[in-house]
Image (spheres, rainbow, N blue to C red):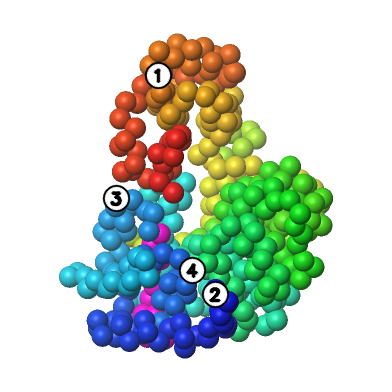
């Protein structure tokens, strides 16, 4: 694998050797668990390559995780070492409590906040990683001549598997942006003849807003994942640039499962990879709501809880998404925890949030549910607008979606110390 960064190509020796020496000096050895809290693409790449050479196991933890989330991970997974990078400086910490969990070489441990905000610890071993790569390679017809450009973090499964790991296995080129600006990305695509890019809808929306630019024919795939993408963006992007955005579906636990194709709309997936099957199971006491249950025995990993592996049923993994069939396509309609049953009617939290955030004086908003019904927790910039806010809700929401109570949330500063999925915060109070 070659890595292009800031006008220069680096090979694996260039990237790995310095970290190998540092880690060995601290006593890192084969099958040790090493928590990696790294900033930037290059530090993730070089650390993974170094640990791979030693035979130690990376545990990727996003730096933006709150201290509480990190502590939950350390309580469940007794890592042997912690490595942290800040401003290109690497720090290594030896942990007093050594791990009793010894994973096989070339495994990777991902941490995911999932929908609840509580961190999951997911292990994918060498065989599972390779199986995911092989079916990805098969569907996309990947080769060593492909050039990958990730615009997403490489410590998450999406960026790691689809860009870094794929480039490594193919002995291909990985292009690393030094800054994720739309014009920089387009420059790198043209400079390095990138064939596959991985991003998220927000970035494609920014690229769409550029004037006087085009996308070269060398691009074979433009992938979007992590969150759903609007039909308006899919259509506008294709009309302006002549390239379609391919949606990708999967999870950290399962790996990539399927992709969309030309003609698919928002959250529609026509192509599922070899070895992947899914069922739609009617939820208990429901007549319409079906949960997506996946079988992917070659790629589904395991959880770690209290320093022990907890196997996941590889034939019956519940995605916690609900969906339906549209012809031969799977339509992923949303997350099960986004749906609230209100007086016998189903309403989406996201729908409520999209209505509420149009109230311009809002500083914080969160939907909760208890035995008496829905509760809105909120804070406005001015207390004088409380009654106006309540009237706004009554006017703009259906009656069954209105809360039983409105609770003023005074101390918004506390939100900075909690994880970012606990509510919607305006005026940049939320941590990225």
Residue at disc 1, secondary structure: loop
- Residue linked to disc 4: 41
Q: Residues within 10 Å of mark 2 (few under 14, many from 20)?
A: some
> Disc 3 or disc 2, which is closer to the eye?
2
Please indicate whether residue 208 sits to the left or right of residue 339 in the image.
right
Please report the residue visible at 37 percent of the width from the left and 84 percent of the height from the top.
18
Point 63% across, 57% down: residue:
182
Q: Which residue is label 1 attached to? A: 382
Q: How far apart are marks 3 and 2 (CA)?
A: 34 Å
Earlier along the polypeptide chain: callout 4 or callout 1?
A: 4
| Mark 1, other Cα within 10 Å: few <14 / some 14–19 / many ≥20 | few
What residue is shown with label 2? 5
Tell me if mark 4 has few (under 14), some (14-19) or many (20+) residues whose alpha carbon lies within 10 angstroms of its own: many
Measure how far apart labels 4 and 3 are at the Cα level.
25 Å
Q: Position of residue 207 (x, y in %)?
A: 67, 53
Q: Please name which of the two marks, 4 or 3, marks the residue nearer to the observer.
A: 4
Please indicate, yes or no, whether residue 32 appears anywhere in the rendered image: yes
């Amino acid at each position: 694998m070659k890595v292009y960064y800031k006008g220069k190509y680096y090979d694996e020796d260039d990237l790995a050797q310095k970290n190998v020496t540092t880690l060995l000096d601290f006593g890192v050895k084969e099958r040790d668990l090493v928590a990696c809290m790294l900033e930037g693409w290059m530090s993730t790449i070089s650390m993974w390559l170094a640990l791979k050479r030693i035979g130690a196991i990376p545990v990727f933890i996003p730096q933006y995780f709150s201290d509480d989330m990190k502590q939950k991970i350390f309580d469940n997974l007794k890592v042997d070492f912690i490595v942290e990078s800040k401003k290109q400086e690497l720090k290594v910490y030896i942990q007093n409590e050594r791990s009793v969990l010894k994973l096989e070489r070339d495994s990777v441990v991902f941490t995911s906040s999932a929908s609840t905000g509580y961190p999951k610890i997911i292990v994918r071993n060498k065989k599972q990683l390779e199986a995911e790569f092989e079916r990805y390679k098969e569907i996309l017809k990947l080769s060593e001549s492909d050039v990958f450009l990730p615009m997403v973090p490489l410590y998450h499964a999406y960026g790691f598997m689809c860009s870094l790991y794929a480039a490594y296995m193919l002995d291909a080129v990985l292009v690393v942006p030094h800054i994720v600006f739309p014009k920089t990305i387009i420059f790198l695509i043209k400079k390095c003849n990138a064939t596959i890019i991985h991003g998220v809808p927000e970035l494609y929306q920014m690229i769409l807003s550029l004037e006087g630019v085009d996308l070269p024919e060398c691009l074979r795939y433009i992938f979007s994942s992590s969150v759903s993408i609007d039909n308006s963006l899919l259509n506008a992007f294709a009309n302006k640039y002549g390239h379609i955005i391919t949606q990708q579906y999967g999870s950290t636990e399962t790996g990539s499962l399927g992709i969309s194709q030309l003609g698919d709309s928002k959250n529609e997936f026509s192509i599922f990879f070899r070895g992947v099957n899914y069922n739609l199971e009617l939820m208990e006491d429901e007549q319409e709501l079906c949960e997506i249950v996946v079988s992917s025995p070659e790629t589904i990993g395991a959880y770690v809880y209290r320093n022990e592996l907890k196997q996941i049923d590889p034939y019956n993994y519940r995605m916690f998404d609900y969906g339906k069939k549209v012809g031969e396509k799977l339509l992923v309609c949303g997350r099960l925890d986004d749906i609230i049953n209100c007086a016998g009617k189903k309403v989406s939290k996201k729908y409520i949030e999209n209505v509420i955030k149009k109230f311009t004086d809002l500083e914080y908003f969160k939907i909760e549910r208890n035995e008496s019904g829905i509760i809105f927790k909120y804070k406005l910039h001015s207390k004088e607008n409380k009654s106006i806010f309540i009237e706004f809700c009554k006017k703009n929401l259906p009656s069954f979606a209105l809360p039983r109570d409105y609770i003023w949330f005074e101390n918004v500063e506390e939100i900075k110390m909690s994880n970012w999925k606990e509510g919607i915060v305006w005026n940049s109070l939320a941590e990225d």
